[in-house]
Image (cartoon, grey):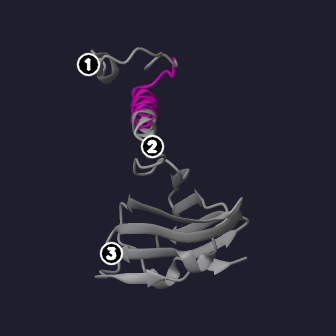
């Protein structure tokens, strides 16, 4: 029995014919996120489920890990990348304010958007070897496997390109 069936939700959950168990789990996770987002939108809370707004791609090879995340309209000063042991945390917070004078009234709209993702690495990298660049809204992080370096916590600088 699927989660959607247990919750009484009736859409095409799990019918993507993905082929492998890993793909099926990814499909199930995506379907679950979409359903939670849909339910939260009905309460007026759009985009509140963690991880729903950023496309995070992680690729590991023999030489290291490459991570890409989309941050449209965000500058490098609004992104924080922290390495703690073998856990890489990517955080972003952006505030905006818009004021309008409309037909005899004044309207002020404030928005705060925040995101945090953690990537569990299979090794403890040297924080001095990690590079982070932001170009046209695409954050690229390169984490080379140069050996193990026990580190408590290190902040990685994000450079605009």
At x 42%, y 80%, the residue is 126
State whether the magenta stretch is mostly helix, strand or loop.
Answer: helix
Rounded to the nearest whole Å, what is the CA distance between mark 1 and mark 2? 24 Å
At x 42%, y 26%, the residue is 24
Residue carrying label 1: 6
Point out the tag, 1 or 2, that comes first from the N-terminus. 1
Point out the tag, 1 or 3, that comes first from the N-terminus. 1
Point out the tag, 3 or 2, that comes first from the N-terminus. 2
147, 7: nearer the viewer:
7
Residue carrying label 3: 84
Rounded to the nearest whole Å, what is the CA distance between mark 3 and mark 2? 35 Å
Rounded to the nearest whole Å, what is the CA distance between mark 1 and mark 3? 38 Å
Placement of 109 over or under 47, stated as above or below: below
At x 53%, y 50%, the residue is 53
At x 40%, y 33%, the residue is 39
Q: Quick one: quadrant of the N terminus? A: top left
Camera-side mark, 1 or 2? 2
Q: Residue 117 is drawn in which quadrant?
A: bottom left
Camera-side mark, 3 or 2? 2
Classify 10 Å Cα crowding around label 2: few (below 14), some (14-19), many (20 and above): few
**In this orientation, does residue 152 appear?**
yes
Q: Quick one: quadrant of the C terminus? A: bottom right
**Which mark is drawn over residue 44?**
2
Q: Position of residue 65 (x, y in %)?
A: 50, 62
Instruction: Give the structural element (helix, strand or loop) at label 2.
Output: loop
42, 19: nearer the viewer:
42
**In this orientation, does residue 158 appear?**
no
Classify 10 Å Cα crowding around label 1: few (below 14), some (14-19), many (20 and above): few
Q: Which residues are magenta?
A: 17-36
């Amino acid at each position: 029995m699927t989660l959607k069936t247990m919750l009484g939700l009736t859409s095409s959950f799990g019918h993507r014919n993905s082929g492998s168990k890993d793909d099926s789990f990814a499909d199930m996770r995506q379907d679950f996120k979409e359903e939670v987002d849909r339910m939260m939108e009905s309460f007026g809370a759009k985009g509140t489920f963690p991880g729903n707004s950023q496309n995070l791609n992680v690729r590991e090879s023999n030489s290291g890990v490459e991570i890409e995340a989309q941050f449209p309209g965000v500058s490098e000063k609004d992104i924080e990348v922290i390495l703690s042991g073998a856990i890489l945390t990517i955080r972003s917070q952006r505030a905006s304010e818009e004021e309008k004078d409309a037909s005899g009234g004044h309207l002020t709209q404030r928005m705060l958007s925040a995101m945090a993702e953690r990537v569990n690495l299979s090794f403890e990298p040297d924080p001095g070897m990690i590079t982070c660049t932001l170009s046209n809204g695409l954050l690229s992080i390169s984490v080379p496997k140069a050996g193990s370096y026990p580190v408590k916590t290190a902040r990685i600088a994000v450079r605009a390109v």
